[in-house]
């Protein structure tokens, strides 16, 4: 380890790390200093294949793209910042226009913020202001799903659908969150099997609306593919039914595409494959491929038609540098055919992951585009989840990292979301490492 690296580890005590335990810090965490393509290197010189695009999945076009750095520098030199309130700037206008051409249906009004959490917060405020100016001020409740993740600002945290200290420590949260069971076909809450289940998961949304009183519900929010259980897709008919329910009760449907947008799931947006037009959509992550913070909430004109102004403000909203990078990033995605590539290479990856279902620890391999997961189980017959203290996920993540592969644990699963530029050779190597670490963990547990 170099002197510079030693200094960084010593100075790490001054940095408050996000969701990193004292035990993890004491054991030593990697300090990543550079990246190229789908690989990153830490300060010791160790090389890793990044199978989760920066772990929180934003790095769509890969590391080291000079085009994005150049777009950032050129715009910063020309205009680094100006307020989004009562003024605007060309990159923000241009990116809003570009997004309007890509978004489903008539979702064509765009508000820019800095993070996915802020995009969700903005969406919730849009929904509530929509009804306020329509004269329906009683509407404040939000229907969300157990297992959902929508961010960490207080409004977004309030609709965090899992029992987790991130929410519990901060309670009481913003009032009005109502949770329904998720469409989790592998572990159906009603012990049913699709398609003979009559979409009970969608009907619970209707039941919750009726129980909470329709004239008090502002919105239903959901991820088109849920991250909380590990890249969990759901039947297309589920979303069609939820759309019908929202229309029947004049309730806004918010679709959270913070992760799924910009090619992650093999279409520009996951809503496209579902034939779904939300009333409000959130997006972030791959909008700039992680090169600079940027997010957006977009809506149909009917959401804002009664509003004299959207009563909201972020200092960094419509940031000209971030929006310039967003435009260049979308240009790269389109010019290099990365959306179609996500579908093709993602199918190849999922087929390889399916071969790992023979492992005793693996219950189900699933994925959409280049967002995949291995759902782990303690009993392949009953599909039982592991108790948290006995879950093999942390050990598997650690074993993979030692071998130079960065993966993550998400709920009951191991999750994978590599940059969209990843090669099949890189995926073959990654699957071979996953095979190894699963075998090692199963041997350690006496399962083979």
Image (cartoon, helix red, strand yellow):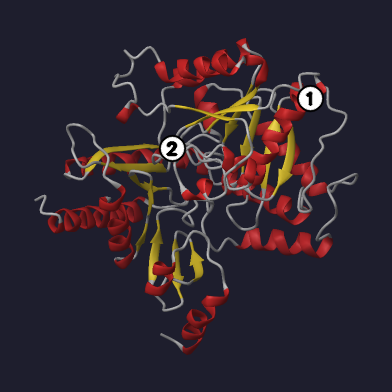
Q: Is residue 345 left or right of residue 122?
A: left
The residue at the far bottom in this view is 3
For residue 72, say whether it is visible: yes
Q: Which residue is nearer to you in this view: 439 or 34?
A: 439
Coordinates of residue 222 in the picture (x, y in percent): 53, 31
In the structure shown, which secondary structural element does the residue marked by tag 2 occupy?
Answer: helix
- Give neighbour class at mark 1: few <14, some 14-19, many 20+ (Cα, 10 Å): some
Residue lying at 61% horizontally and 15% vertically, measured from the top left: 213
Q: In this view, does 195 lie to the left or right of 154?
A: left
In the structure shown, which secondary structural element does the residue marked by tag 1 occupy?
Answer: helix
Q: Which residue is nearer to you in this view: 390 or 266?
A: 390
- Give the mark nearer the N terminus: 1 vs 2: 1
Q: Which mark is residue 30?
A: none
Q: In this view, does 320 lie above or below 378?
A: below
Coordinates of residue 272 in the picture (x, y in percent): 55, 27
Q: Alpha-carbon distance for marks 1 and 2? A: 41 Å
Query: Disc 1 designates what residue?
Result: 132
For residue 108, say whether it is visible: no
Coordinates of residue 372 in the picture (x, y in percent): 38, 42
Q: In which quarter of the image is the N terminus?
A: bottom left
Query: Disc 2 designates what residue?
Result: 343
Q: Is residue 40 above or below residue 283?
A: below
Do the numbered discs 1 and 2 sit on residues whose CB atoms are within 8 Å?
no
Q: In this view, does 399 lie to the left or right of 167?
A: left
């Amino acid at each position: 380890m170099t002197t510079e690296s030693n200094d960084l580890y010593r100075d790490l005590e001054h940095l408050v790390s996000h969701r990193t335990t004292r035990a993890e810090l004491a054991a030593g965490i990697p300090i990543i200093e550079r990246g190229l393509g789908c690989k990153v290197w830490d300060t010791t010189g160790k090389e890793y294949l990044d199978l989760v695009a920066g772990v929180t999945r934003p790095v769509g076009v890969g590391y080291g793209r000079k085009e994005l750095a150049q777009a950032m520098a050129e715009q910063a030199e020309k205009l680094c910042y100006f307020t989004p309130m009562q003024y605007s700037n060309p990159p923000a206008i241009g990116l809003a226009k570009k997004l309007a051409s890509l978004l489903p249906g008539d979702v064509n009004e765009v508000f820019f913020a800095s993070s996915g959490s802020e995009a969700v917060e903005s969406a919730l405020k849009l929904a509530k202001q929509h009804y306020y100016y329509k004269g329906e001020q009683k509407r404040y409740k939000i229907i969300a799903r157990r297992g959902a993740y929508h961010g960490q600002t207080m409004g977004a945290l309030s609709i965090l659908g899992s029992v987790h200290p991130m929410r519990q420590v901060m309670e009481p949260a913003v009032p009005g969150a109502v949770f329904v069971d998720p469409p989790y076909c592998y572990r159906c809450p009603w012990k049913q099997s699709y398609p003979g289940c009559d979409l009970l998961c969608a009907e619970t949304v209707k039941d919750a609306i009726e129980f909470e009183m329709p004239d008090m519900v502002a919105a239903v929010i959901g991820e088109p593919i849920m991250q909380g259980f590990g890249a969990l897709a759901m039947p297309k008919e589920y979303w069609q039914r939820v759309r019908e329910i929202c229309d029947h009760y004049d309730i806004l449907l918010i679709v959270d595409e913070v992760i799924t947008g910009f090619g992650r799931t093999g279409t520009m947006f996951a809503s496209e494959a579902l034939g779904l037009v939300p009333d409000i959509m959130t997006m972030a992550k791959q909008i700039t491929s992680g090169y600079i913070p940027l997010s957006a909430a977009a809506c149909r004109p009917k959401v804002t038609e009664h509003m004299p102004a959207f009563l909201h403000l972020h200092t960094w909203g419509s940031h000209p540098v971030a929006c310039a990078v967003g435009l260049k990033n979308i240009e790269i995605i389109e010019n290099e055919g990365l959306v179609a590539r996500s579908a093709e290479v993602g199918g190849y990856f999922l087929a390889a992951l399916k071969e790992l279902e023979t492992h005793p620890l693996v219950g189900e391999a699933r994925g959409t585009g280049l967002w995949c997961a291995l759902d782990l189980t303690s009993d392949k017959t009953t599909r039982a989840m592991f108790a948290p203290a006995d879950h093999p996920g942390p050990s598997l993540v650690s074993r993979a990292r030692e071998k130079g592969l960065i993966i993550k644990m998400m709920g009951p699963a191991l999750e994978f979301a590599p940059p969209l530029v990843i090669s099949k050779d890189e995926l073959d190597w990654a699957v071979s490492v996953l095979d190894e670490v699963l075998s090692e963990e199963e041997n350690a547990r006496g399962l083979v």
